[in-house]
Image (spheres, rainbow, N blue to C red):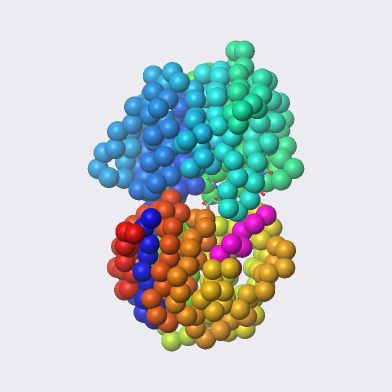
């Protein structure tokens, strides 16, 4: 397994280009199953998760071609195997996103249950229940979801008890080709959900209300092809900005947008960072200053994103004062705390709350990544620790951060990848 070797103490300086959003491109690629016509997706990040879903679509019979690096053409007109095997789904839970499109377009689907992961059991009961309300006949047997519908799915009035990002996305995609109108109440408002809706509307879908708690989808007979550019990754953006704040540097993130991570920017300003923004860039300046500890409570968008919680815990470990962090979305998303403690961090855990008392500096140690965002927080800790930190199992990080060591090295970080 590859490892990262990171020698801390260098303030990050310079510019970094932000890639397309992982959590946008995954549902968008699944959404290509809804049309027989060719679709061109631009600003696609080069990530392991993208490779996985491309493999999955290819196994189903779709043709995928990569042209000039960041662009993929998808032709799903010949899909004839509506099946998502456990071997692929277990490596990427987001594979569940093919369930709605396959049912809507092909009237049947066999999709492996994703299973849990390090941050929680990650059930998909909302997805299954919503499709049942739309007329699907669904059984769960032997670890697989078997779903079918006679004719088309039917529009329905759906309501989530708990906000679910991929739950909203799956049911929105299923509704696009259903007979009649579907309403989704207590829908997720994340920018990635809005990006998916904009993509589907570009193919001829009739979706309104995306970005609010109530989404209305009027089913259409079919979708056409089209070309779409994926939204910038707000979590990648936030991760580099936190890296600059922790190291006392000054960086500009380019090809991104400020209005997709305002809650994160407000917390960085509260920590003492100077932030300036433009149409497609954000600059953070923390030169000569130590961050101040901040309190965080994660929540669905527009609240503070759970995907930035681990990174802010790393920030709080070296900040001035005490920060209290509450994780309200996932059941077990503090795995990084145990590894940060190995680096000297002062963290008290109590259920879904963590209290972090900042210390002047962390000490390098061998640590192990457990999930995608936890591994990012360990890399951030390595950037400020005294000595050389070894982060193991960085295949987690490769799922969601494109070329992270190259991008950090370009900003002056002392980081390299070693095979082991
Ligand atoms: C999406 O996961 C993201 N993944 C996650 O990003 C992100 O952390 C999460 O949304 C919250 O913002 C993708 O978009 C591919 P949920 P998702 O359904 O959709 C419970 C990353 O690091 N729930 O919004 O799986 C669930 O257990 C990843 O990029 C049910 O109980 O999350 C959780 O407690 C990690 N039943 C809560 O809802 C269901 O059927 C929110 O989960 C579905 C969800």
Locate residue 352: give its quadrant.
Answer: bottom right
What residue is at 48 percent from the left and 42 percent from the top? 91
- List the single residue furthest toward the right: 161
Residue 173 visible? The answer is no
Locate residue 285: give its quadrant.
Answer: bottom left
Q: Is 332 covered by the magenta stretch?
A: yes
Quadrant location, the C terminus: bottom left
Residue 140 in percent (x, y) is at: 65, 27
Decide which of 250, 118 is in the foreground and name it.
118
Residue 390 in percent (x, y) is at: 41, 69
Residue 55 in percent (x, y) is at: 39, 34
What residue is at 55 percent from the left and 23 percent from the top? 109
Residue 399 in percent (x, y) is at: 43, 50
- List the single residue furthest toward the left: 68
Q: Which residues are magenta?
A: 331-337
Q: Is residue 204 above or below residue 400?
A: above
């Amino acid at each position: 397994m590859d490892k990262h070797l990171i020698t801390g103490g260098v303030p990050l300086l310079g510019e970094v280009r932000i890639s397309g959003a992982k959590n946008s491109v995954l549902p968008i690629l699944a959404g290509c199953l809804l049309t027989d016509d060719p679709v061109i997706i631009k600003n696609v990040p080069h990530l392991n998760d993208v490779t996985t879903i491309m493999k999955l679509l290819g196994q189903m019979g779709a043709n995928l071609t990569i042209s000039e690096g960041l662009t993929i053409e998808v032709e799903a007109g010949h899909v004839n195997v509506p099946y998502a095997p456990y071997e692929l789904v277990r490596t990427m839970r987001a594979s569940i996103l093919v369930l709605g499109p396959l049912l809507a377009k092909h009237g049947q689907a066999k999709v492996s249950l994703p299973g849990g992961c390090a941050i929680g059991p990650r059930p998909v009961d909302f997805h299954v229940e919503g499709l049942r309300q739309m007329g699907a006949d669904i059984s769960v047997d032997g670890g697989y979801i078997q779903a079918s519908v006679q004719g088309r799915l039917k529009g329905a009035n759906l309501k989530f008890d708990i906000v679910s990002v991929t739950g909203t996305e799956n049911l929105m995609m299923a509704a696009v080709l259903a007979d009649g109108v579907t309403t989704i109440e207590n829908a997720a408002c994340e920018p990635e959900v809005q990006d998916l809706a904009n993509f589907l509307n570009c193919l001829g879908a009739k979706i309104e209300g995306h970005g609010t708690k109530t989404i209305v989808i009027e089913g259409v007979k079919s979708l056409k092809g089209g070309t779409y550019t994926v939204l910038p990754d707000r979590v990648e953006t936030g991760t580099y900005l936190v890296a600059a704040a922790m190291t006392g540097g000054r960086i500009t993130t380019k090809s991104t947008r400020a209005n997709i991570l305002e809650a994160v920017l407000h917390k960085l300003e509260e920590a003492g960072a100077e932030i300036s923004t433009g149409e497609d860039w954000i600059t953070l300046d923390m030169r000569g200053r130590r961050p101040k500890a901040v309190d965080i409570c994660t929540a669905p968008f527009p609240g503070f994103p759970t995907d930035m919680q681990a990174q802010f815990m790393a920030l709080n470990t070296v900040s001035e004062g005490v920060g209290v962090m509450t994780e309200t979305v996932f059941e077990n998303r503090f795995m990084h705390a145990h590894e940060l403690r190995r680096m000297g961090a002062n963290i008290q855990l109590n259920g879904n709350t963590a209290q972090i008392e900042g210390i002047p500096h962390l000490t390098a140690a061998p640590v192990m990544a457990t999930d995608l965002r936890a591994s990012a927080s360990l890399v951030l800790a390595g950037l400020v620790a005294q000595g050389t930190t070894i982060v193991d199992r960085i295949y987690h990080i490769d799922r969601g951060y494109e070329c992270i060591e190259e991008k950090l090295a370009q900003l002056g970080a002392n980081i390299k990848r070693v095979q082991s």
